[in-house]
Amino acid sequence: MTATVENPKVSAAIRVRGIEKSFKDLPVLRGVDFEVARGSIFALLGSNGAGKTTLVRILSTLLKADAGTAVIEDFDVAAESLQVRESISLTGQFAAVDEVLTGRENLILVARLRHLEKPDQIADDLLARFALTDAGSRRAATYSGGMRRRLDIAMSLIGDPPVIFLDEPTTGLDPQSRNEVWQTVRHLADNGTTVLLTTQTLNEAEQLADRIAILHRGTIIQNGTLAELKQLLPPATVEYVEKQPSLEDVFLALVGEAPVSDTETDLLPDAAIQQRKET
């Protein structure tokens, strides 16, 4: 399967054609093409230096492309940058919250900067939506990594942008915090938000994305659903082996968090531990 674009009959929130970008004599993007359907999660998967962040900066109007076109919510990124900015939100690799302020004050501040009515109500609604109500009156400096990330994403949603960019959203997070962010991303798509996330973590793309594009040396080398990408390799050989729990399974069970993957068991963590002891 070669790099393809999605079904044109599906409404696209993002359309990218032939995007190129070089920094002096170093080509970073060499003709990138893809589309993202509205209300879907699209993962841009690639190693460090593949051009993921550069592409996100172009799509979010922070950087100009050397060639090619990009359209977001029917607005041209180069010619209609103001309308594009009103349609998107960008969450970078590290949470951009004011640690001196409380979680609620961070949200109110952004709502006021956007000149929205009832900023207090907006803040309270988002705190409830992201399960941060109890922590809303605490300074953000006291939040865990996952809580800060959820607050950061909540701030990005003020004004109800239809498209959100998440640039490596779980960088530096522990397994519990990562799972919290994953759940938040799923809820975004369930509520109709189009999510484009960049990641270098294979498991993250596998867990979240409706479609996955592999960016390698500045170009999309494959683009498809997880099932389509798996078909690129020969069929797996069926072997019966004893499945041992991973360190992540053990960690999440011990701290009382169910693993994201359901391939091993649907038991609650305590029951799973007890069963392993008995065997």
Image (cartoon, rainbow, N blue to C red):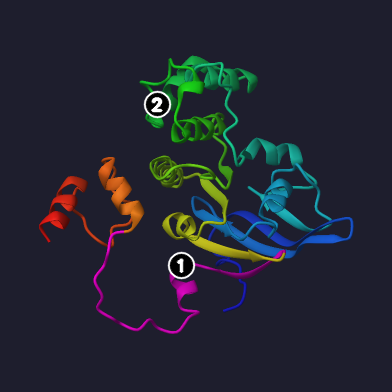
Considering the whole magenta stretch, tell me its main secondary structure. Answer: loop
| Residue farthest toward the right in the current orientation of the protein | 24
Residue drawn where x is 47% and y is 73% of the image: 228
The answer to whether any part of residue 33 appears in the image is yes
Was residue 237 drawn as part of the magenta stretch in this picture? yes
Was residue 4 drawn as part of the magenta stretch in this picture? no
Q: Which residue is mark 2?
A: 132
Q: Which residue is mark 1?
A: 226
46 lies above or below 61: below
Residue 28 on image: x %, y %: 77, 59
Which picture quadrant has residue 217?
bottom right
Question: Residues in magenta?
Answer: 218-245
Sequence-first tag of 1 and 2: 2
SS of the residue under disc 2: loop
Residue 255 on image: x %, y %: 29, 40
Q: Is residue 62 left or right of residue 279?
A: right
Residue 33 on image: x %, y %: 68, 64
Query: 41 or 251: nearer the eye?
Result: 251
Which picture quadrant has residue 124?
top left
Q: Is residue 111 left or right of residue 227?
A: right
